[in-house]
Amino acid sequence: MLPKQTLSAMIAIIGVLFCSWAGAEDRHFLMNAQTMPTGEAARWSLMTNPQKYGYFQPVEISLPSAGHVSFYQGSPQSPVLTQAPSQAGMMVGHTYRVRISGMPEYPGVELYPTIELLDRLHPPEGEAENFPIPIELTREEIQIVLQERMVTKVVYLEQPEFAVPFEQGAQIHVEDLPVKTNLIQAADERGRPMAIVRIGGRIPDPMSPNDEFYSRSPIKISPAR
C-alpha cells in the first residue's frame, strides 16, 4: 500500500466520456487524453524528457474490494494473475493493458483498462517499491463502464500550494470535471501528470489473439505483499 505520508500527495482527476463522444481539438494545449490515440501522450512525454527512458515505475492497482488483476505480456496466453491490490513495475513512456476480473460485487464482469505512464516518482534510494503510483478503480467508475460509457482519468502529483487542505485518509481525492475538459491540461495546472487511465471501450477479439489489444510493453510483476 502507498505510505500514508505520500498518499495525500497523489490526486486523480476523473472525466467521464461517452464512447461516441468527439470534442473539438484544444488549440491551446497540445496533449489531450480524450482525443489523442492511446499511448501517444506517453511517447511525447518521453521524447521531451528522455532521461526517464528505461525506468520501471511501480504502479498499484486497487479495486472496490477483492478481485483479480491480470497483466499481459504481448498475448492472451499465460497472463500473470494476481490478487488485488496488485503492484507492478511499468516503464515510463509505455502503455499497459490489464484485465480486471473476479470482483464479488460484479460476478462474471471483466474489464480491460489501459494505463499510460507519463512520468515517474523520485522516492528515497532503494524505496521505489514503497512509493507506487496508485490506480484506484471505484464502484462508481465500474457502474459507468457497465452502462457502455467510458471513463478517462489522469493521476497527478499535486503541487504543495494546491494540496487538499484536509486529511484524506485511505482514499484518493477524485475531482469530477466536465466532459470536454482537457484532463492533461487540468492536471498540469494542478501539478505533474503521472498516468492516464482509460476504462471501457474495446474488449479482446478472440479471433485475433495477437492483435495490439494486448500490451507488449516491458513489465516487472511485484511479489505479493
Image (cartoon, helix red, strand yellow):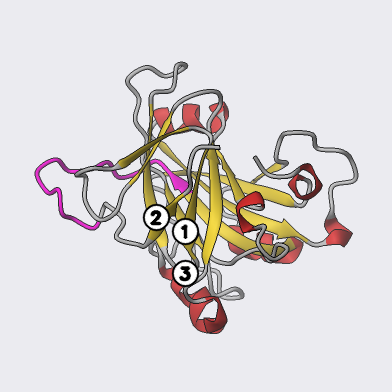
Residue ID at (21%, 51%): 75
Q: Main secondary structure of the magenta part?
A: loop
What mark, if any, has residue 90 been given in the picture? Answer: 1
Query: Mark 2 is on which residue type?
Result: Tyr
Query: Mark 3 is on which residue type?
Result: Gly
> Which percent across, then down, holds residue 79?
28, 43
On screen, residue 172 versus residue 83, left or right, reads: right
Q: CA distance from mark 3 to mark 1?
A: 9 Å
Residue with the most extreme front position? 126
Mark 2 vs 1, N-terminal side: 1
Query: Mark 1 is on which residue type?
Result: Met
| Pointer 1 local density, CA inside 10 Å: few below 14, some 14–19, many at least 20 | many
Q: Are marks 2 and 1 in contact (CB under 8 Å)?
A: yes
On screen, residue 122 versus residue 184, left or right, reads: right
> Which percent across, then down, holds residue 19?
39, 45
**Residue 57 among those drawn in magenta:** no
Q: Which residue is mark 3?
A: 93
As helix, strand or loop, the secondary structure at mark 3 comes to: loop
Q: Which residue is mark 2?
A: 96
> Which percent across, then down, holds residue 47?
49, 82
Q: Is residue 34 visible?
A: no
Q: Are marks 3 and 1 in contact (CB under 8 Å)?
A: no
Comparing labels 2 and 1, the label whose residue is closer to the camera: 1
Quarter the N terminus occupies = top right
